[in-house]
Image (tube, grey):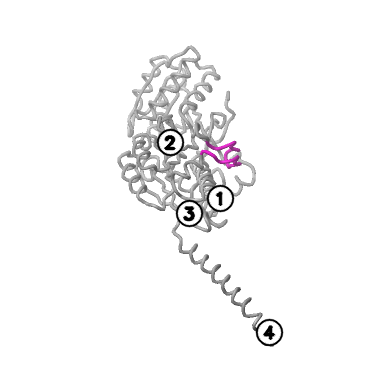
Amino acid sequence: MNRSHSGWQPLFRAFLAITAAVVGCGVANAAAPAIVIGLDADMSSASAQGGEAIRRGALIAIAEINESGGLLGGRKLELQVKDHHGVPARSTDNLNEFAADDQLVAVLGGVHSPAIIENQQLIHDKRLLTLVPWAAATPVIDSARQPSYVFRISARDQYVGAFLTAQALAAGHRRLGLLLERTAWGRSNEQAITEALAREGLAPAAVQWFHWGDADLTPAVLALEAAGADAILMAANAVEGAAAIKALAARPPARRLPVYSHWGVSGGRFVELAGEALRQVDLQVMQTYSFLDASGPRARAVVDRYREMFGVERPEHIPAPVGVAHAYELVQVLALAIRQAGSIDRDKVRAALENLPRHDGLIRSYRPVFTRDRHEGLSAADYRMARYRSDGVLVPVKAAVR
C-alpha cells in the first residue's frame, strides 16, 4: 500500500507540473496582445465604398485566421481603421500613428494612389510594411527604394493602360481620347496609354484633364469630340466618372463616344450618381475579379462568410468586389509570411513576403505571390472587362483581347 502510494505521488506531481505548464501557456496566450493590421483608406468621401470593401475583405480573412487558432501560438489578428478621406496629408498622420504601434505588423493602404505615393519617404523611413489592395498608379510600387516595404495585389496602370488600349483597338477604334483626373494616378495612366499607343504607331487624339469634384465635364467631352476621338479611355473615380457619363449621354446618340474605363468608378456611388445616363452610354470597366463567375471552395467560403457578416444575400450584391477580394488575399498572404517569419517584426515579415512558397489564393494560384524583384501579385493576365447591368451590377464580359 505504501509502495503503491509512494509510486503514485511522483506521477501525480508530474501530472500537476504538466497541467500547470499547459494552463500557464494558455493564460500567456490569452494575455498576449493582438497582432494589429492597420487600414488607411478613404472611408468617408466619394470613394468610401472602395475603402469599406477593403475593410470587409480584410475582416473576412481575419475571422478565418482567428477561428483557425490565430498566429504565433494563438495570437489573434485585429484590424484598426483610419480614414484618410482621400487626402495624402491625413494619410501622413495616420501612418505616423500606425508606425508607433509596436504590435502593428502592416498597413493596408487603399483606393487613392496619391495617399501612398506622397508618403513613400515616410513609409520607408519608418520601415512600415504597406500592402496595397486598391491603388493602381505604377509609382506605388516603382519607387526605386531598396529594400521596398510596399507590396501590391491590385491593378498596375502600366498594364491597365496597355490593356484598355488593346480593348479599344480590337474594337476598331483608332483615335482614342483620354479623360483623366489631374493627380498622380491620372498622370500614371497618361504615360501608360501613350506608351501603349506609341507601340502601335499611334498617339492620343487629345487629352482632357479634370479635378476632383468637377461636376460638369461637358467641356472636356466636347473637346475630345472636336479632336476627332472615336472612343474615350477614362481614369476617373465615381463622382467625376458619373459627370462624364452624364455629359456623354447629353450628346446626340450618334456622337456618344464609347468609354473604356479604369476601375475607379466602381469604388463609389457611381451607379446612383450616373442614374439613367448610364443606360445611354456604351461603357466598359476594367476589373480583376468578380464573385459572379468565381468557383471553388475558397470563393464559396468567402461569399458565405460575407453573407453571414454583412447581410448580403447574393454575390452580385457585394459592392466593389475587387476591393473585397484583394484585401482578403493580402491578409491571407500576410498571415503566411508571419508564420514563416515566426515573428511580427516588420523587417522579418517583409523578407518572408519575398520568399513564400506557392499559394492557391482566392483570385489565382501564385507561384509565388512576390519575389525580391517583383512586388506585384497580379499581372495583365488577371484583368477583365465588365459592363453595368440594368440593375447596376457589374457583370464580367469577355475581353476583346488578352
What label sits on residue 77 in the rendered view?
3
Residue bearing the label numbered 2: 148
Whether label 2 touches label 1, CB < 8 Å: no
Q: Residue at x 49, y 41 (%)?
A: 351
Residue bearing the label numbered 4: 3
The residue tagged with tag 3: helix, strand or loop?
Answer: strand
Magenta stretch holds residue 360: yes
Please state which of the two labelled residues, at mark 1 or mark 4, is closer to the viewer: 4
Q: Identify the image quadrant of residue 366.
A: top right
Please state which of the two labelled residues, at mark 3 or mark 2, is closer to the viewer: 2
Please state which of the two labelled residues, at mark 4 or mark 2, is closer to the viewer: 4
Question: How far apart are labels 3 and 1 at the CA level?
Answer: 27 Å
Residue 220 screen position, x and y as percent: 36, 23
**Tag 1 or tag 2, which sits nearer the N-term?**
2
Quarter placement of the N terminus = bottom right
Magenta stretch bounds: 354-370
Question: How far apart are labels 3 and 4 at the CA level?
Answer: 52 Å
Q: Identify the image quadrant of residue 68.
A: bottom right
The residue tagged with tag 1: helix, strand or loop?
Answer: loop
